């Protein structure tokens, strides 16, 4: 074992971890739930790999492809027997680096040189072909009442699309199909010794076939297709696009584009049919499909895990790793990490951050073909939900090709009553119902309609709204500190409001290692009228009435309570009580000692005061400046000093900037997580051109140079150049407009990134932060 941690104890569960067993194959995130909770980075003796299961750790690895090299991404996870190796040699098998396993700087040069065919304009050309193929395949079985979707459609179509995209003539499909399965087993599986030889022959044949096709393509380099694009690029950049790359990519490209997508759609349809109400929801409203695709990739993605190797001694999630440590990042597990996704087990096609899943990887190597895959999956779902909304899963056991990474059921049997096919009565169901979205879903794809069931004033100028799902779909459970985005009618303003209710108590189902958090039937928000705001609070106060349906997104949480705190001190200023009310409610319920300091100008303007007194008794300290009981925050912080340094107390604060500034200054020398603040109002975002300087920005992936003038934000400049970056608050509060920074110093002006993240300087909020120097290089 090359990797074996000499000093690290291997726990029983880590020792038993078997990614080739049925447990992992059936449900990878559930199989490693114990690890996410208690041992997020562990060494697996079975694999001789370090296994990483939490979202942030996985993302940090993806983010740094220098320390965590992708060189092992396509390495065989099970070493080949000598006999199988001899077989491969007899075929001159020479699979080399492609893109996905190439190191820098070669990788980025190659990626940039080969990106053209992945642009939205190029991808749009493939849409009619995908739709025609799906339509024709469904025609073949729509009247049968029963189908095995993998063999009858899901395998075939992404293969045809992959071949078309690569520019391969589409004969030899059945042979290729056999070869590509063999390639998966060869690379990511655990073939038995006798199987290895057969697999090696198939892989050898695949290799030779790929070479022959490439030779034929070289004769017609002007054909459309990614490979021909590569052949043409080779003329200008022979050192970047080498012969060895082209041959290897011919083979790896088919697998990259084919199996991932075939498995992706099979997993998606299985997941949606297992969650019937969600299937029915998208049958009724196909505009949900783009985000449903994303949610399926998050919840039940086709890439369960991906690999890296360390190039120097380093650390992941606090665990020291030596140089040369092989790492298996179980992205399927990261996608179910409750530290990142609210209520991760819920299939929520309106989840507004579903597209932040790790199924396409992240960072410099993030899947280039993701928008093609998204397009295919959308068309599949649209055709199936339109033509066979009454389809259901047949009784069956699901089987998977045992391997660590490529995951999808081998068969997917569905059945329906053909006499109830809608197209027999209404041929218009054959018309495309929604436009295919090329790229990430937009805000319009994941908004949640919520009915206002109660409006009440809970203090002078503070309105309390109780909201419930307007279409009866379940609301995700939320953790204290989370917020929702509310679209303020047609004012164009979107405002973030903390959920101020206490989440329902978790229950521990018998025999289940993890507590189950029941779903709430309502969300509560409280909105203070601020006449100087951009109109959001005034709209809530003046326009919103009981019975209205609001457009809401979320919940999301950037203000989380730590999982193992010994004591909390909550400090709320004015309307900053909203997240604190929820947090304190949970602390009380969990029996964690806490105190609340609630600061305001006037008692009658302090929301929920009477109720808080009743609930929290003398744990609540009320400070009213009109009564002369102004809080001495510096004294409070100084009293907490020793405990905060020992990690015995965590201070959580939400309120006006002045209050936050006092707390932050007093906590300057505390450990990083001892004081956590949320600003409900921000002085950020406003540009004062007199005090700004112009700076240059280079977009590395797209090779574009821009200049950000003194009076424009980076976000505005990117948008002016046609680079679509999502945004929300536009003042550094919400984390929506994050962009990756590759080089250059950033003048961070947001309140989202932690001090450590700022120091690391690998991302910034485009809406407010700027270059500290005269140039930034962004990973866009
Ligand atoms: C890379 C997943 C579809 C082409 C990757 C990576 C993953 C992945 C996990 C590695 C990312 C990293 O290291 O950060 C998927 C999934 C798909 C899919 C789940 C379908 C649901 C496609 C399609 C194509 C494609 C349709 C081509 C048309 C590529 C390429 C890379 C890649 C070229 C290498 C990018 C680089 O290293 O710069 N994909 N993929 N993928 N994928 Fe995909
Ligand atoms: Fe919210 Fe930039 S848009 S942080």
Image: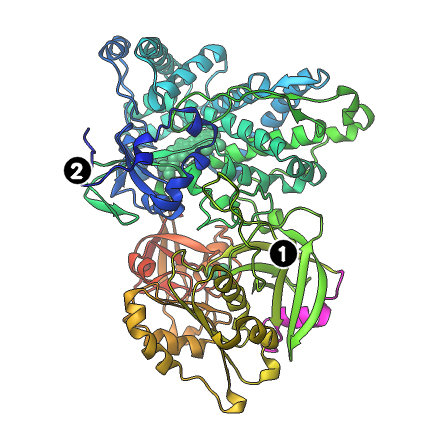
Q: Quadrant of the N terminus?
A: top left
Q: Residues within 10 Å of mark 2 (few under 14, many from 20)?
A: few
492 left or right of 189 in image: right
Label 2: state its secondary structure: loop
The circle on residue 74 is none
The structure residue drawn at horizontal position 49% and vertical position 91%, both measured from the top left corner, is 628
Mark 2 and mark 1: span between their CA atoms? 51 Å
Viewer-nearest residue: 773 or 261: 261
546 left or right of 554 in image: right
Label 1: state its secondary structure: strand
Q: Residues within 10 Å of mark 1 (few under 14, many from 20)?
A: many
313 left or right of 255 in image: left
Residue 609 sits above or below residue 160 on the image: below
Query: What residue is shown with label 2?
Result: 6
Query: What residue is shown with label 1?
Result: 552
State yes or no: Cβ of the residue under disc 1 lies below 8 Å from any atom of ligand 2: no
Q: Earlier in the sequence, mark 2 or mark 1?
A: 2
- Range covered by the magenta-colored residues: 528-547
Can the viewer see residue 39?
A: yes
Residue 396: image quadrant is top right
């Amino acid at each position: 074992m090359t990797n074996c941690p000499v000093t690290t104890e291997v726990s029983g569960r880590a020792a038993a971890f078997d990614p080739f067993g049925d447990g992992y194959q059936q449900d990878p995130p559930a199989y490693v739930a114990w690890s996410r909770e208690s041992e997020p980075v562990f060494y697996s003796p079975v694999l001789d790999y370090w296994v990483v299961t939490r979202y942030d750790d996985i993302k940090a690895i993806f983010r740094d492809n220098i320390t965590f090299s992708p060189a092992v991404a396509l390495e065989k996870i099970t070493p080949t027997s000598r006999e199988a190796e001899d077989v491969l040699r007899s075929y001159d098998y020479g699979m080399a680096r492609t893109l996905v396993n190439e190191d820098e700087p070669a990788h980025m040069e190659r990626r940039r040189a080969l990106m053209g065919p992945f642009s939205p304009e190029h991808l749009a050309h493939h849409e009619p072909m995908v739709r025609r193929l799906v339509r024709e395949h469904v025609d073949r079985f729509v009247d049968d009442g029963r189908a095995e979707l993998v063999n009858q459609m899901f395998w075939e179509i992404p293969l045809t699309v992959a071949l078309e995209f690569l520019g391969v003539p589409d004969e030899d499909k059945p042979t290729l199909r056999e070869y590509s399965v063999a390639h998966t087993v060869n690379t990511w599986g655990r073939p038995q010794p006798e199987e290895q030889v057969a697999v090696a022959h198939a892989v050898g044949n695949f290799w030779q076939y790929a070479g022959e096709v490439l030779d034929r393509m070289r004769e017609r380099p002007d054909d459309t297709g990614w490979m021909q694009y590569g052949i043409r690029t080779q003329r200008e950049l022979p050192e970047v696009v080498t012969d060895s790359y082209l041959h290897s990519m011919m083979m790896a490209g088919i697998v990259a584009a084919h199996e991932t997508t075939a498995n992706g759609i099979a997993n998606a349809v299985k997941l949606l049919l297992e969650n019937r109400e969600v299937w029915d929801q998208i049958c009724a409203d196909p505009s949900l499909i783009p985000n449903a695709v994303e949610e399926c990739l998050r919840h039940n993605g086709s890439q369960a895990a991906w690999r890296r190797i360390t190039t120097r001694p380093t650390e992941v999630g606090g665990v020291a790793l030596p140089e040369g440590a092989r790492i298996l990042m179980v992205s399927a597990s990261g996608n179910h990490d409750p530290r990142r996704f609210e209520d991760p087990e819920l299939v929520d096609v309106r989840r507004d951050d579903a597209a932040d899943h790790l199924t396409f990887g992240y960072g410099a190597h993030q899947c280039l073909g993701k928008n093609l895959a998204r397009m295919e999956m959308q068309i599949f779902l649209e055709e199936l939900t339109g033509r066979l909304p009454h389809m259901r899963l047949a009784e069956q056991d699901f089987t998977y090709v045992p391997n660590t990474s490529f995951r999808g059921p081998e068969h997917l049997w569905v059945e329906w009553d053909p006499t109830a096919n809608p197209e027999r009565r209404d041929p218009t169901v054959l018309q495309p119902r929604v436009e295919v979205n090329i790229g990430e879903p937009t805000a319009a794809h994941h908004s949640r309609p919520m009915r206002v069931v109660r409006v009440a004033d809970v203090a002078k100028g503070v309105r309390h709204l109780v909201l419930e799902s307007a279409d009866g779909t379940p609301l995700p459970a939320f953790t204290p500190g989370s917020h929702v985005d509310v679209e303020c009618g047609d004012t164009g303003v979107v405002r973030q409001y903390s959920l101020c209710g206490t989440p329902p108590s978790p229950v521990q189902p018998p025999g289940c290692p993890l507590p189950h958090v029941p779903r709430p039937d309502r969300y509560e928000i409280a909105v203070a009228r601020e006449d100087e705001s951009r109109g959001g609070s005034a709209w809530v106060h003046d326009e919103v009435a009981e019975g209205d349906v609001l457009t809401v997104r979320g919940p999301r949480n950037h203000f989380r309570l730590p999982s193992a705190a010994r004591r909390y001190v909550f400090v709320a200023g004015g309307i900053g009580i909203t997240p604190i009310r929820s947090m304190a409610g949970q602390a009380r319920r969990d029996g964690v000692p806490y105190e609340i300091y609630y600061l305001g100008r006037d008692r009658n303007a302090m929301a929920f005061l009477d109720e808080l007194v009743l609930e929290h008794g003398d744990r609540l300290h009320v400070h009213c400046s009109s009564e002369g009981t102004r809080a001495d925050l510096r004294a409070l912080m100084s009293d907490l000093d020793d405990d905060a340094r020992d990690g015995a107390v965590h201070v959580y604060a939400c309120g006006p900037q002045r209050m936050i500034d006092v707390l932050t200054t007093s906590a300057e020398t505390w450990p990083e997580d001892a004081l956590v603040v949320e600003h409900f109002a921000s002085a950020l975002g406003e540009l004062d051109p007199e005090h700004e300087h112009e700076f240059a920005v280079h977009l590395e992936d797209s090779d574009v140079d821009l200049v950000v003038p003194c009076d424009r934000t980076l976000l505005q400049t990117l948008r002016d150049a046609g680079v679509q970056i999502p945004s929300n608050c536009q003042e550094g509060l919400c984390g929506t407009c994050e962009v990756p920074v590759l080089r250059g110093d950033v003048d961070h002006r947001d309140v989202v990134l932690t001090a450590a993240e700022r120091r690391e300087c690998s991302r910034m909020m485009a809406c407010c932060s700027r270059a500290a120097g005269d140039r930034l290089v962004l990973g866009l």
